[in-house]
Amino acid sequence: MFLKKNGLVEKIRETPLTLGDISEDVFGGISTGNIFLHKVGFPGNNDPQAMFMCEGLCVAVNIEPELVYPYVSGTLAGKFAVRSSPYGFMLPYEFSGSGVRKACRAIPPSELQEKYPLAYYQVMDFKKLFHHDASPLDSADYYSVRGRKVMEYLNTPKIIINEGYRLQAAYDPTGNHVFREGCGIVLKDPEKYLYVTAVLNSPLAKLFPSLCKNEMSYPVSLTPAVLKRFPIAFPEDSRVENLVSTLSSYLIYLHGQQYAAKEAENSGWLDELTELTGFYEELANLLVMDTYLGKDTSLRFLEILEENVHPFAGGMEFENDGSLLAAMHCIKQKLLGTRDFEKCRLDVGFPDLMSFP
């Protein structure tokens, strides 16, 4: 097992292309000494008129909602789909530009008081309570944050990477989530997001410390510089990439449904989703690992997948949950009922790799 793992690591390390090569930018999270000033709880009843909860003040507060962005918390950031925390992040900033990267600036206190008085008075209350200072704000330094790239790439699609016992990659199609831990990835080619998300969630993530052992010490310390070294291999056959991307879109939806089931404490629904998710993850992983090991995927296996695995017309956002789940169950049953599918799947499989700790 050990020698086989080392041989696999060396094989993958030969991949000439890296995540840094295909990325517009890889960057760290936001940073502030006043996290409790910026972090606010979303109303639990989804009432747009309800008040936020200021974590620092432990009281309900009014804040202009356009200044509050969904917040992703550490190892709970999610796999494939972003898993938002019950908190938002207040950013008293203004943004300009319509490109991938926007200009941003902290709103000066006088302007903040005029345009966003609710946010201004929350800052003042926080300052008075925790700094025993009731004097007027004379600088935006009190509520400004570090980690400007998170803000410069707000509302730009991205992948958010976090680490727990292994890397997890979540695709944020709206790009409006704020995070502190982990890294954000903006790709040069937006068409590659689904494929790259699948790669970063594949068994390769288990090998991340070994792949990057020259750039980091163990345990893993996730930084943009290290993440840029992650090897990225694209299949020579475009059909394989298209299939991985489609399976990745399925998994983004299914993981999002899993998070909803956990929040609803619906164990029956969660078990069903977990089984379905595992099936599609295995298919995506097999195709990804074929690509990295330079193997030609069985033509019969590709033929079976192409006949059954298709993007949903109009995108998943236009389908209701019931019809999507029914369709995914139907696809699974058709695959399992297709002659040669199980044989092809076993022939392609990498059980030793899947079991690496």
Image (tube, rainbow, N blue to C red):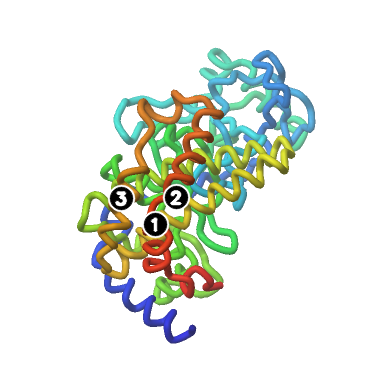
Residue matched to label 1: 341
Residue 164 visible? The answer is: yes
Looking at the picture, how far across and down is residue 16, in whole percent?
24, 67
Residue matched to label 3: 23
| 330 relative to 314 in the view: left or right | right
Q: Earlier in the sequence, mark 1 or mark 3?
A: 3
| 287 relative to 256 in the view: left or right | left
- Taking depth in this image into account, of 8 and 272 the one nearest to the observer is 272
Q: CA distance from mark 1 to mark 3?
A: 36 Å
Residue matched to label 2: 337
Q: Amino acid at mark 1?
A: Phe
At 52% across and 68% down in the image, what residue appears? 220
Helix, strand or loop status at disc 3: strand
Which quarter of the image is occupied by the C terminus? bottom right
Q: CA distance from mark 2 to mark 3?
A: 40 Å
Looking at the picture, how far across and down is residue 173, in whole percent?
42, 35
